[in-house]
Image: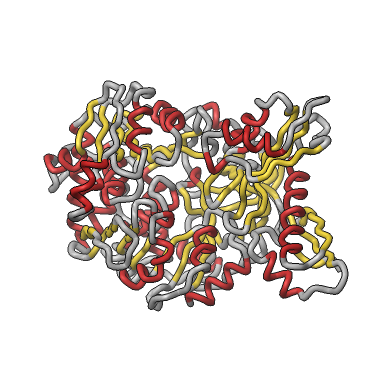
Amino acid sequence: MAQERFAWATLDDKRQIEAIPAEQRWPGGTVYQMLAGTAARHPSRPAVSFQLKGGPADPAETLDWTALKAQVTQAANLFRSIGVGDGDAVAYVLPNATETVLALLGGMTAGVVSPVNPLLETAQIAAILRETGAKVVVTLAPFPKTDIAQKVHAAVAEAPGVETVLEVDLKRYLRPPLSWLVPLLRPKVERRHRARVLDFRAELARARADALDFAEDRDPDRIAAMFHTGGTTGHPKIARHCQRGMVYNGHVGALCLIGAEDVLICPLPLFHVLAAYPVTMTALASGAHLVLPTPAGYRGEGVMDNFWKLVERWGVSFMVMVPTAASALMQRPVNADVSSLKYALCGSAPLPVELFRRFEEATGLRILEGYGMTEATCLVSINPPDGERKIGSVGLPIPYTAAKILHCAADGTVLRDCATDEVGEICLRSPGVFPGYKDPARNAGLFAQPGDWLRTGDLGRIDADGYIWITGRAKDLIIRGGHNIDPALIEEALAGHPAVAFVGAIGQPDAHSGEVPCAYVELAAGAQVTQQDLLDFAAGRIAEKAAVPKTIEILDELPKTAVGKIFKPDLRKRATARIYTRALLDAGIRADVTVVEDPKLGLTAEIAVEGPEADEHAIEAVLGVFARPWRLRR
């Protein structure tokens, strides 16, 4: 049965949707059942399109819903045939491609899928394979201009539980003469492991396509995915996801946002929960057409320059982005017919107000800022598509999700509920909330008691209309363009320098990425070292390039709490004042910038203009590109 899309404009609309029990809103308990139902309703409609290159006329492969179901069935049967059971992990270390969708959906049907970021270094990939107990790894065959195959085979040598490596050869997407060159340019890869290596497509072709060879476990609480999250040190956190949460993400998206007639373009990576769940699962639930432009998405060659032409080519109605992508797109002309666009979902980091306005004016679409997290199987809240969008908020909780602001003790005991507009920790309950991390030791204090509310670690408030406002992060993660960076990674590296006594890493405001890493250090008594020496030292010790600090400042003494812990709020204030002062000076505006903790807005810059008064619009043009708020000091 086709799914009705409900108008959603206010909190009352959300309550009306929730008045009908969730189990009556959507049938079936598994992702495979959801796929099968959509394939039955829309057998010949396009399901997934992928193009290797970013040009508006470059070749593309499209699977209709019948073909997608058949190939997912083959993938699931293939995984079972090589020993994957209900509790066994199928890892994929892949950029975006048709095969990535098959690995995602087939892996969670046959066993437990484990998406891995292919940009990670070998040691980090190996740690995730070990922690998840991966039995099978799907990755790229050696291919020019990428080292993914080299890293993965080296990682498998450090993960003895891996029995099979299935390789995806991107050569099949090329036409002569480029396809003729691939065998000549393939890099050589050392395979110092005992796992067998098979061709994914060749093995897929041997598998049955019309039905599963096994009885699918339809328990909605079955663990069907594991995503690594948080830091990228040697002991990754592994979040476990149930089928219930995946199906929930898809059907809520179809209830409120997307219909079968829609076309979603997703230039975000399928190893991330945003692309894997709210995007892919919503396409599965609704029958919408999912478009994947190039393996690297927004980072793919030609994608940014041709993005608006790709929108026109595919008739895109719904796009997904992060603030860094929005900023990059606004540096290019809207040089195509984008009248098909209706909405853009923006998440992962705050979107600066000025960028929000410029983007909507240039494209004519409506931006829906949202909030999600791996521990909630992603989507938590969104500004309602048919109602008021409060810029700077992350909207209303999605249907069947409840949010509270609580003060909790370290062990999760609820000390008290917060009042309207009072800042505390954002806590959640929903069908998407995960059952906990794979390592039980990481679950201490994770849920607020009584009530089993998931503690997000994010600080925020809920206003009188039910909108959620995020004011800070209790977890201290640095979010660079939607990419989570554990500050401990930076701190541990710099602490290894003999001249460093204390170090605190934070995210400093950045017009392009939202935040970039910054570090403050206090030197050991009598030690001498330059900032450049420390920058070079950090670059040599931090394997994750995105985590290398952009700035390192040496202070006489770092701010500390009474028990000697580095007090990071003061460091964030210092960094924000420095960045905003410099940006204003570069624009010819002399100002005194003081950063304060506003009870509703979080860190807020107060601007006192020196000399002749600067026009407030001129200040807005400079500081509007940053996510953190500001105001004039009268």
- Number of labels in the image equals 0
In the shown orientation, is residue 41 left or right of residue 244? left
Closer to us: 369 or 576:
576
Compared with residue 625, is residue 188 higher up or lower down, i.e. above or below?
Answer: above
Closer to us: 200 or 394:
200
Residue 524 falls in which quadrant of the image?
top right
In the shown orientation, is residue 478 left or right of residue 263? right
Display colour scheme: secondary structure
Compared with residue 279, is residue 162 higher up or lower down, i.e. above or below?
Answer: above
Pinpoint residue 140: horizontal percent, then vertical percent: 29, 40
- Any part of residue 224 in sight: no
Pinpoint residue 207: horizontal percent, then vertical percent: 14, 40
- Any part of residue 634 in sight: yes
In the shown orientation, is residue 116 left or right of residue 328? left
Pinpoint residue 32: horizontal percent, then vertical percent: 27, 48
Pinpoint residue 395: horizontal percent, then vertical percent: 57, 62
Could you tell me which quadrant the C terminus lies in? bottom right
Could you tell me which quadrant the N terminus lies in? bottom left
In the shown orientation, is residue 162 left or right of residue 578? left
For image coordinates 70% across by 24% down, the residue present is 498
For image coordinates 48% across by 69% down, the residue present is 332
For image coordinates 82% across by 56% down, the residue present is 594
Compared with residue 196, is residue 1 higher up or lower down, i.e. above or below?
Answer: below
For image coordinates 57% across by 72% down, the residue present is 358
